[in-house]
Amino acid sequence: MNLGGDIRFIDFHTHHAVGSPDTVVVKNLMAGEDVPQDFPPNTVFSTGIHPWYLTAELLDEMKTGLILTLAHPHVIAIGEAGFDQLRGPSHAVQRSAFIFQAELAEELGKPIIIHCVKGWDSLLKVRNELKPEMKWVIHGFRGTARLAATLADAGLWFSLGMKGLTEEVLSLIPEERLLLETDDSKGNIKDVYKGYSELTGKDVTEVTELIRTNFNNLFVK
Ligand SMILES: [Zn+2]
């Protein structure tokens, strides 16, 4: 994608928000869900097999559903996809679903939005095996500084919400691999921009340029 200067805010991962003249949102859909017939301008979509809703029995059906949803031109990313050690099916099923999605991301040239709870070793192992060219974005990161540093070293991108914005984590993430989001909260993306601006001392205009450039770069190999 190549957004111009009229776009001031990008909500990289949301379940609720919709686009507006100065805001692009990436709204999440379940694999197999139809892209709505009518959606406000500046609304694009991601779709993936989320570990919470995955079962061994449903895996094949979800893979087919994912491919169908991905066929819509407004679906720009795969996800949420990933590993969750507290919810969802066995590790083997989660791994199989994730590898399928990571390979599809390479084939289709789309980034992945990653949901990961405690499954960091599994995630990094797949990353090492596949050596993907597409960007992998950890969404809603709220882990320790040490983990942030490990993931940043591995080349991962980050999408942070209000609760993930800490000075320590921001000092460890390359700013050119950062995006902002509201996720499941009813918060406004403008407040997340403001929070980031306050923590970094950059003014909001600088932040809007940084995040817009990052977003555009996400789709460049
Ligand atoms: Zn989400």
Image: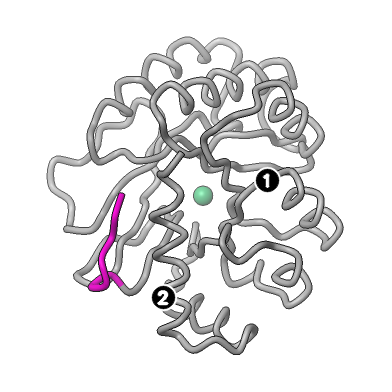
Crowding near the residue tagged with mark 2, few <14, some 14–19, many ≥20 C-alpha atoms within 10 Å: many
- Residue at x 60% of width, y 25% of height: 98
- Residue at x 38% of width, y 14% of height: 64
Q: Please, what is the three-letter code of the amino acid marked with disc 1?
A: Gly
Label for residue 208?
2
- Residue at x 60% of width, y 51% of height: 157
Q: Main secondary structure of the magenta part?
A: loop
> Label 1: which residue?
155
- Residue at x 58% of width, y 20% of height: 97
| Residue 63: image location, x then y, percent | 45, 16
* Outermost residue, front side: 221
Displayed quadrant of residue 73: top left
The image shows a total of numbered marks equal to 2
Task: State the extent of the magenta-drawn residues as a range.
Answer: 1-7
Displayed quadrant of residue 85: top right
Q: Kindly indicate whether the residue at mark 1 contacts the one at mark 2 (C-beta within 8 angstroms).
A: no
* Outermost residue, left side: 38
